[in-house]
Amino acid sequence: MMKKIVLIAVLTLVLSGCQKKDVFTSIRDAVTRQLTLKCEYTDEDGQTTSTYIKGQMVRMVGAGSGTTKIEGLMRDNKFYLWSNENKQGMILEIAKLTEGGAKMGEKEIKSIDDVIGVLEEKKDKCKVASEGAGLFEVPTDIKFTSTEGFFGQ
């Protein structure tokens, strides 16, 4: 009887060490554990968006008007938006965004928690990604303009 208990205890310890480190139960769980996630989904307008999230940083790639791709990065309480086609972008202070300033679908985005809330609804479209840390860096080849004074900021 004692051998069975010891065997069960040893198996439990071995199996607990074999858990996959890239399994997440929720978007918040993945954020807390600093996993990089990629979520791909199609919005109500039929446009496909790829959203990457790691910790308190979010990177988005979506369609703008026509065939233009619009990219965005939320980090350090700022929202960077740009187009790689014309190498132009703007910087928004997230805390100063007013109504209608930034949206994911119908949800207004005023914090990383808003992004997490939207992605929780699309969790089945998210998977652990292997993209490097550079994905969450502000691009150096884009000319960013501050929008201080615009959009009610």
Image (cartoon, rainbow, N blue to C red):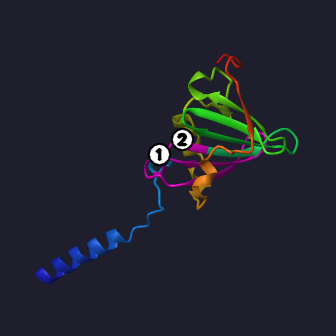
* Circle 1 SS class: helix
Residue 139, image x, y percentages: 69, 45
17 drawn magenta: no
Residue 61 position (above or below residue 105): below
- Packing grade of label 2 (10 A; few <14, some 14-19, many >=20) is many
Viewer-proximal residue, 144 or 124?
144
Inspect the image, locate mark 2, and give the three-letter code of the amino acid beneath it. Ile
Residue 28: mark in rendering? 1
Viewer-proximal residue, 118 or 65?
65
* Circle 2 SS class: helix
Residue at 39% across / 68% down in the picture? 19
Residue 60: mark in rendering? none
Q: Which residue is mark 2?
A: 116
Residue 47, image x, y percentages: 78, 45
* Residue 12 as seen in the image, left or right of residue 76: left
Q: Is there any visible trace of residue 136 in the rendered image?
A: yes
Instruction: Give the magenta-colored segment's residue range.
Output: 30-58
Residue 78 position (above or below residue 3): above
